[in-house]
Amino acid sequence: MTNSRHSCFIPVNSLFSEVNSHTRTIDELTWKRRSIILIWMVGEASGGRNDVKDTTLDTFDPLQSGPDTVAVREKDLRVSWRANIPFVGVHAGCLLVLWSGISPIAALVGLATLLTRMFGLTGGYHRYFCHRSFKTTRAFQFVMAVLGAAAAQRGPLWWAGHHRSHHRHSDTAADVHPPGIRGFFWAHIGWVMCPAHNRTRTEWVPDLIRFPELRWLDRHHYVAPIALAIGLFLAGELLAQSTPSLGTSGLELLAVGFFLSTTVLYHVTFAVNSVGHTVGRRRYATRDTSRNGLLLALVTAGEGWHNNHHRYPTSERQGFYWWEIDATHYVVTLLSWLRIVWDIRGPSAAVLAEGQKRA
């Protein structure tokens, strides 16, 4: 048996679902299934870290897991304002700051919720779930999924499925957000507001749907942001009663820490799809229109090196050279020092040499 870092995870819940009654004993199972149970029990006894370990992932290419074509009805490619009342409501909630104001403590809370959830999207949803660019434990995998879901950009399976499809069909008619074909507004925000993209593209995420906790979080993606909003309001009310000198309130923390922070996070994320395919320099001659941009990289924690990313999507590091600031990579590196993540993928030597020639 391998060391605890690479201990084997067995989907025990799905295995025991085959036991139709309490009277059926383990002895009735096949020898093969009994062996699986024994391996799981030994793994739990030896530390039970439940690391996300699957040897098939060493050769799995997430960008080749989905279909070559996507059939979408034209009427479903229209923005549905009625269906997006909650989305619009988050933007409208920013107006609450006109009544609540923004105290120093509220600004700090807003910055904290912004940066924490940004890593949930950039490090979690994007670099881990979409591209499997590093490995981690099952527990931290779920932590990243919850942080990403708290950003109110739907669930990890929905996000990963659409993004993998984007890479396969980037800047073509089959792409979910091609600015050169459907325009800047569509690439930035329109595509997330149309019925055509409501469905989770499970055919693109066969490696992720095997985790029941991710499936649950994807179905109930609204739980995390609602819980965050309620928690911020209650925390603000508690601080107003216990420490009035801070000058904050439940309404203020809700307005700044949730509505304003979430709206900013929406648009810096969406800018990668719109600005990242229209403005900036192209180091690599990719088949799409992806571009690199320092300003975009700064406000998106490193996602602005988008041409780099499209040239070598499996690299966790998107700032390929030392001068390309990539805050998400710095956090992932720190997590690797703490042994929370490992096997971090980087750009190949050939890709780096190619980039230096074109710099």
Image: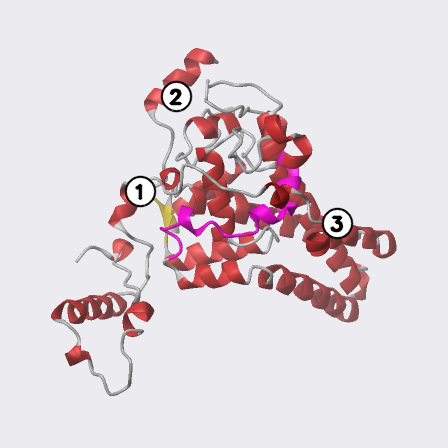
Q: Nearer the viewer, residue 232 or 39?
A: 39
Residue visible at 30% across and 46% down?
57
Residue at (53% x, 54% y) in the render: 155
Q: Which of the two discs, 2 and 3, labels the residue nearer the N terminus?
A: 3
Which residue is the site of mark 1?
A: 60
* Picture residue at 46% right of the left edge, 29% below the top: 310
Cα gap from disc 2 to disc 1, whole angstroms: 23 Å
**Which region is colored magenta?**
187-209
Tell me, yes or no, whether the highlighted magenta stretch contains residue 159: no
How far apart, in angstroms, are the residues tagged by discs 3 and 1? 39 Å
Q: Is residue 1 left or right of residue 18?
A: left
Contact? badges 2 and 1 (CB < 8 Å)? no
Tell me which amino acid carries mark 1.
Phe
**Residue highlighted by disc 2:** 352
SS label for mark 3: helix
Q: Quadrant of the N terminus?
A: bottom left
Q: Mark 2 or mark 1: which comes first in sequence?
A: 1
Mark 3 or mark 1: name the one nearer the start of the chain: 1
- Residue 107 x %, y %: 73, 50
Label 2, secondary structure: give it: helix
Q: Which residue lies under the disc numbered 3? A: 91
Query: Label 2 sits on what residue type?
Result: Leu
